[in-house]
Amino acid sequence: MAESLAFSKTSGRETLYKEIIPQIKSLVEGESDLIANLANITAVLKEAFGFLWVGFYLEKGGQLVLGPFQGPLACTRINFDQGVCGHAYTTQEIVIVPNVDEFPGHIVCSSASRSEIVLPIFDKSGEIFGVLDVDSDRLSDFSETDAQGLSRITDIITKIL
């Protein structure tokens, strides 16, 4: 098990994703506990990118329920018809929000959040399992580079489910 990360602190996001993805694979390889794996993934993303908030919401009992995360306190439960997370879950598509104040129905879990990206997570049978939610304290902080890099990470999660 790794005890530290190695990445270029001054590199762009594309390079950072390329550097951390093999390390994430190594972290989760051989570990069967989903919560432990998700916790380590949030820690890697928070440390590498310094995002405001990184976490998982998992489907439980007809809602999205807070899972492992790094950052300020978060909403505990989100209905499927609420917020960016609910939208990503129900549409089963990646959602990039440049300005959360302009997203209809945005849930304010942290007033410091300015932009957000949410990715659906699927299990091995193709059923939606939850979402990866990443918030930034900067407007328009997420791009297609993040969508692609984070998708590679959600693909790793799918393989361990």
Image (tube, rainbow, N blue to C red):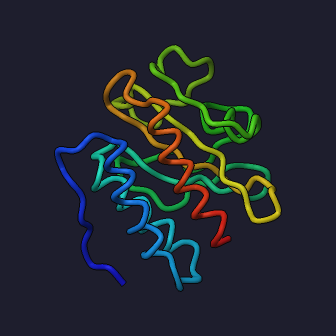
User: Residue at point 59% right, 52% down?
Assistant: 57
Quadrant of the drawing holding the N terminus? bottom left
Task: Tell me if residue 157 comes above or below residue 103 in the rendering.
Answer: below
Q: Quadrant of residue 12?
A: top left
User: Is residue 90 rendered to the left or right of residue 106?
Assistant: right
Residue 140 x %, y %: 39, 22
User: Is residue 10 rendered to the left or right of residue 90?
Assistant: left
Q: Quadrant of residue 18?
A: bottom left
Task: Tell me if residue 37 comes above or below residue 98 in the rendering.
Answer: below
The one of 111 and 87 positioned closer to us in this rendering: 87
User: Is residue 123 rendered to the left or right of residue 21?
Assistant: right
Residue 123 x %, y %: 74, 62
Residue 114 x %, y %: 39, 25
User: Residue at point 55% right, 49% down?
Assistant: 132
Task: Tell me if residue 70 comes above or below residue 98 in the rendering.
Answer: below
Residue 154 x %, y %: 58, 55
